[in-house]
Amino acid sequence: MKKLIVNADDFGWSDSVNRGIIAGHQNGIVSSTSVMVNMPGFEGAVDLARANPALGVGLHLNLVRGRAAAAPERIPSLVDREGFFRRSATALLRDLWGRRVSPLEIAREWRAQAERLLKAGIRPTHLDSEKHLHALPGLAPILVELGRAIGVPAFRRVSFERLTPRVLLWRSSYKMIGLATGTALGLALVGRAGIRPLRAPDRTVGLTAAGHLTVGELLRILRRVASGISELVVHPGLVDQECREISAHCGGAFIDAHREGELQTLTDPLVSAACRERGIQLVDFGALTEEADRASVPPAPGR
């Protein structure tokens, strides 16, 4: 059976982005979302999540945008004096590789973000992160330990996608190659450390389509969805002045130019029809737990 998690990142970014994600869920194919607990729209996102129980909600772990959840004195290598992150994943990775960022402080901050979401009454279906940082070798073990500590069994896998000559012209394809390689190394380190990894979809699709997710491109992606559980990563939303101001302050302006276009794509009737025609079942990360539970049930006597 073909199962597809259509996961909208950045829930909690702003009220307008929240409204767009909910529109994508109610009127389109969005089945899951990932919430940023340290952004201005978080409280509104919690209210919307409660009002839309069919929408799976995961935790979008963040080390790049906005003000940290932990107190600045507990994570001084991650934030400035006012408690704000660097705004740049490149700068964070440079300092991480240069050993100017403490992995212990990353674990401390991610735990604070998880506790904020749990305190709001939402148990996340999965873990992922801004800029997919959780998949990199130094951070994958931290993510796995967090998931096991708070009882969240699933995470986003970053995997290779089919690279056509057209896709190779997009800058995001090279980012995807690096992330996929980093994921493989990160999970290998988890295995060598003897940590049982969390469950993940069989594959992640749509990473190279970020900023290019037209109806035609999404239909091409849907034609390639294979048996098993796949995740499509999307960034729908509505953009208003508040959203632009948040992005200008937090360094996330690139995707704002594409949020409303992605929302239109995800709610296009042709897309929903294609899912039905291809027998694609829209699910959230809870489907991973259901699959694992079914696999663990022993066969009935006599079979």
Image (cartoon, rainbow, N blue to C red):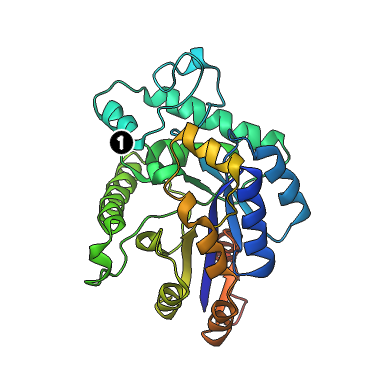
Q: Which of 144 and 31 is in front in this view?
A: 31
- Name the amino acid, label 1: Thr
Q: How many numbered discs, if any?
A: 1
Is disc 1 placed on a helix, strand or loop? helix
Say if 177 sits above or below 13 in the image.
Answer: below
Q: On the rendered structure, is 56 left or right of 83?
A: right
Q: In this view, does 15 lie above or below 68?
A: below
Q: Which residue is farthest front? A: 241
What residue did someone put label 1 on?
Answer: 90
* Residue at the image position 55 percent from the left and 87 percent from the top: 277
Q: Which quadrant holds residue 32?
A: bottom right
- Residue nearest the observer in this picture, 218 or 190: 218
Residue 107 is situated, as x and y percent measured from the top left of the image, at 46, 29
Label 1 CA crowd tier, 10 Å (few <14, some 14–19, many 20+): few
Whether residue 51 is visible here, answered yes or no, is: yes
Q: How far from the left and from the top, in percent, is residue 11?
A: 60, 47
- Residue visible at 62% across and 77% down? 301
Whether residue 13 is visible to the viewer of this picture, yes or no, is: no
For the C terminus, give its image quadrant. bottom right
Instruction: Tell which residue pokes out farthest to the bottom in this image.
Output: 277
Where in the figure is residue 283, as x and y percent of width and height? 60, 67
Residue 243: x and y in percent read 57, 42
